[in-house]
Image (spheres, coloured by chain):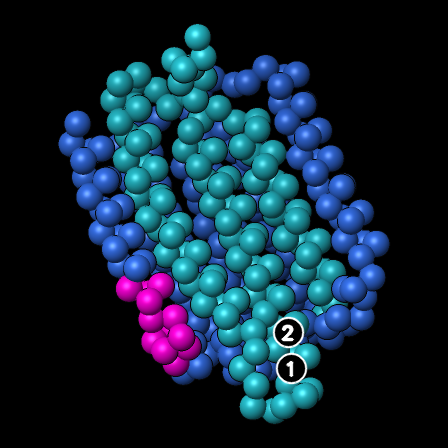
Chain colours: A cyan, B blue
Amino acid sequence: MPIQYYIFFCLTLFSIGVIGVLTRRNAIIVFMCIELMLNAVNLLLVAFSKMHHGAALQLSPTSTAGIDAQIFVFFIMVVAAAEVSVGLAIIVMMYRNTHSTDINFLNRLKN
Amino acid sequence: MSIIEILFFALSAFAVVSAIMVLISKNPIHSVLWLILVFFAISGHYILLNAQFLAIVNIIVYAGAIMVLFLFVIMLMNVKNDNEPQKKLIIKFIGVLSGGSLLTLLVALVKQTTQLEGKQVMMKEGTIGLINPLGNALFTDYVMPFEISSVLFLSAMVGAVIIGKK
């Protein structure tokens, strides 16, 4: 499978996430679109890892090149889990103060 | 077309359609359920690339833990789908235009990159995605980031509790 197919697919998912962040007003949906963008990047990292591993296997059959990207994806998942717990706590606090999850109410820094 | 290509295109189309449904669903609960389907499609891609450990972790962590947390928060808030304010149509149009321009720009950039021509992704073979090599690398070369991530989790937990208690 050519690497370009994976790049195009991941770019499409990433752009859908960007469009969601720009067009929705519900803070939870915005947060979910950020998760979508993180996942698109994860998939692209794994595709590149397999690309380099396939190239390195031609040179030496016992190569483990490309394993770093998969470890990175694992750490991205770890950081995403920590980020979600804090972010959802912030959204719950915001809902308690304003009784809404509309991000347009968060304009107190504007003036 | 081989079975791998058929699976790749089917999973990709499924993921893109589900991702678009996340955006256009009015009810936030439906958005969460569509996003879970996107994560399952991405796990299918991982299995296709023989990254079995990441496929299972993706299902357990994302579809299992994070999305359940989202559902829990939405049900706690009791968000009604009819009172969600919508952005103005011109703002939505500008947002879609910006995202589409970004996609067009990046695709055009990748299309004229000569270094990527002829590069193939190894499908369904290779052992680096299995648990044994990944565990070896994680506990030898990457043991320091692994320990630091535990500190990150601790601080995130303390932060969540403090923010939630206020």
Q: Residues within 10 Å of mark 1 (few under 14, many from 20)?
A: some
Reading the image, the residue beneath label 2 is A52
Q: Position of residue B124 (x, y in %)?
A: 60, 78
Residue of label 1:
A56
Kindly indicate whether the residue at mark 1 contacts the one at mark 2 (C-beta within 8 angstroms). Answer: yes
For this rendering, which residue is in front, B111 or B89? Answer: B111
Give the Cα separation between the discs numbered 2 and 1. Answer: 6 Å
Measuring from the top left, give residue B38's x and y in whole percent: 52, 51
Residue A99 percent across, percent down from the top left = 30, 18
| Label 2: which secondary element | helix
Residue B159: x, y in percent? Answer: 23, 40
Q: Nearer the viewer, residue A50 or A30?
A: A50
Residue range in magenta is B135-147
* Residue B62 part of the magenta-drawn span: no
Q: SS class of the residue under badge 1?
A: helix
Q: Is residue B70 left or right of residue B98?
A: left
Residue A27 higher or lower than B32, as above or below = above
Q: Residue at x 48, y 24 (%)?
A: A25
Q: Main secondary structure of the magenta part?
A: helix
Mark 2 belongs to which subunit? A
Q: Amino acid at mark 1?
A: Ala
* B114 or B104, nearer to the observer: B114
- In this picture, residue A51 sits left or right of residue A62: right
Q: Give the vertical position of B9 relative to A28 (above or below).
A: below
Instruction: Tell which of B47 and B119 is nearer to you.
Output: B119
- The three-letter code of the residue at mark 2 reads His
- Point out the image quarter for the N terminus of chain A: bottom right
Q: Is residue B135 visible?
A: no
Furthest-bottom residue in this view: A61
